[in-house]
Image (cartoon, helix red, strand yellow):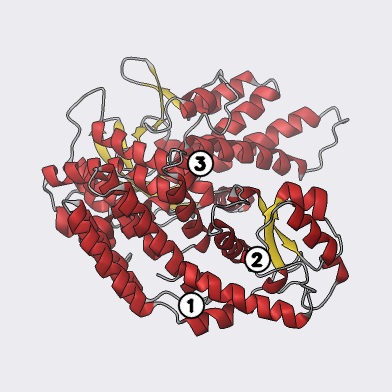
Amino acid sequence: MKIEAQDKEIQELLRGTFFKIPRFQRAYSWETDEVEDFWTDIVENQDANYFIGSVVAYIVDKPMVGLVDGQQRFTTITIILSAIREKFKELGEDELARGVQNYIEGQDADNKKQFILAPESSYPYFQREIQKYDLINLNHSSNDISFEESKIKEAYTLVKKLLNEYLEKFRLNKESSTYKETLIQKVKELRSKILKLKLVYILLDNEVDAYLIFETLNARGKELNVSDLVKNLLLKNLPNSHIDYDESQALWQTLIDKLESVKDKQDKTIVDQYLYHYWNATHSITTAKKLFSTIKDTLGEKSEDCEKFLKNLVENSECYLNILDPGTIDKNIRNNPLIYSLKVIQELKIKIIYPLLLSLLISYKKEIISMRLLKIFVSTIEQFHFQFNGVCRRKTGGTLTTLYNETAQKVYKAIDVSELSTIFNDFKKSLSKIAVSKDEFILNFEQLSYDNKNTKHKNIIKYSLFMILENVPNKPYSSEFTDLTIEHLISQSTKTPYMSNIGNLILVGSKLNNEKLKDLELLNKIKILEDHKYPLQENFLDSHWTGSEELINIRAKKLGEEIYNLTNI
């Protein structure tokens, strides 16, 4: 491996060299605090020779090089230079603006214009709306652009704001005859600071070495994620064979775009999370720490295995999306129970379930498991964790994790519904051995409470009372779960000490609650409920129920016993 290292200034690299972002590189992903920190480091730092670390590239076809490490910094520097260019234009200094543009856009050997930094995944947004001298601003909504483009847009907007704030610090007199000249000088000083940034430029001989280096590098401010390394591994073993279309890169980008559509609802490592759950569901059991090495050892350099893995990973990401956001499943009478169970599981925030859920949905997609068995399987998981985590607040441990992962792999490998039925029965027996006892459940259930100042148990209480309504014969009182609200029989306005106890709570339609019940006295509420054919008896209420502390405690216990029986697996 031939490595050449040199001390360089940014201005040397941005004149005469063109940087291509390789296909295995991750997208631009700096957050607000990282952009602000970088700005503060290079702008507020008084050292004229400020060092910003190393940059690693490999020779593509001189003067074109591939940027292995430094993409986040180079993209941010290009954004800053673009903002400075726009400031010069705003001040009517076209020559100075074009001077800055020379570090953003150069000319190749054929004397044709070419952008110095050329990312592929943000094309054409980055080029058209930030790098181009005559910008084309299309005022995209957040839904019109990709995750990477939105990050670039956020960074550009932030940098322009920081630039204005920086200039305001000098408190220049806008009425002064020298105001404009002084302002131009301050922008020129800032331009110089950026162009004189120091770095170590490491140039590799070829792309193969770059793939190897990439696995060991951490970019400034953001460590490599498992997904970055897996992408590198797959694209290294799946070289592009088409000039105009990189199928493997396009497949990976499809995966990113699909999962990041729910990113705001999840954590920042959603692709890593999917890889971890997918591998444990479909290949072998491993830990998050060992995930990449396990994938690398298994796939090796076999292009056929890598291609199959990538295609399956992308294809089955739709199933993972259904888990993260059950609203993405087609809404119909047949699917509604499944959607409801998945929503409950989402609220419980138990991620060890995901590999098994993923296997089940993949099996259904392949038409191996029936909808009936799928719903029973998922409902069993839902009810177990409602009791185990929701009411009893038990912690999940290694035993459950192993059970879910092992069952997930059995489900994934199953070839017919008969085999899946056997797997389900064995899984249910194993869960039953871990399940909470009736006494433990009721003891914890009786402690549930809810009022305007205490909402911690709200979702668990709502789910519990919904189970009562759902199991009323012929369901004379029914409503969408989302349209049901918790009502205090003894009103919260009374500030009675025990009014927040679950024994004082019922679930009613929001319209009935808001328009009829409100803050009425208990007997009036019960009369209205009777008139609306509310199932009082099934809710352990009657027209003589007085709402004393003793009766509330008795009702809480009866509700607990009933709900335990309804949700016991």
Task: Give, as a three-letter code, the residue at label 2.
Answer: Gln
Judging from the image, what secondary structure is the residue with disc 2 in? Answer: helix
Q: Disc 2 vs disc 3: which is toward the camera? A: 2
Cα separation between marks 3 and 1: 46 Å
- Which of the 4 image quarters holds residue 63? top left
Question: Residue at coordinates 50% horizontally, 58% vertically from top-left?
Answer: 344
Vertical arrangement, residue 193 with respect to residue 528, above or below: above
Q: Nearer the viewer, residue 452 or 331?
A: 331
* Circles 2 and 3 in contact, beta carbons < 8 Å: no
Q: Amino acid at mark 3?
A: Thr
User: Which quadrant: the C terminus?
Assistant: bottom left
Where's residue 125, x and y in %?
Answer: 48, 27
N-terminal label among 3 and 1: 3
Q: Which mark is residue 76?
A: 3
Rendered residue at 30%/31% (across/down): 64
Q: Name the residue at 65% across, 66% down.
A: 537
Q: Quickly name the residue at label 2.
A: 537
Count of residue discs? 3
- Indicate which disc, 2 or 3, sits on the residue closer to the N terminus: 3
Does 53 sit above or below residue 142?
A: below
Q: Residues within 10 Å of mark 1 (few under 14, many from 20)?
A: few
Locate residue 38, reporting x and y percent.
55, 50
SS at mark 3 in the image: helix
Residue under label 1 = 394
Q: Is residue 502 above or below residue 304?
A: below
- The x, y position of residue 341, in whole percent, is 46, 55
Q: Residue at x 51, y 84 (%)?
A: 439
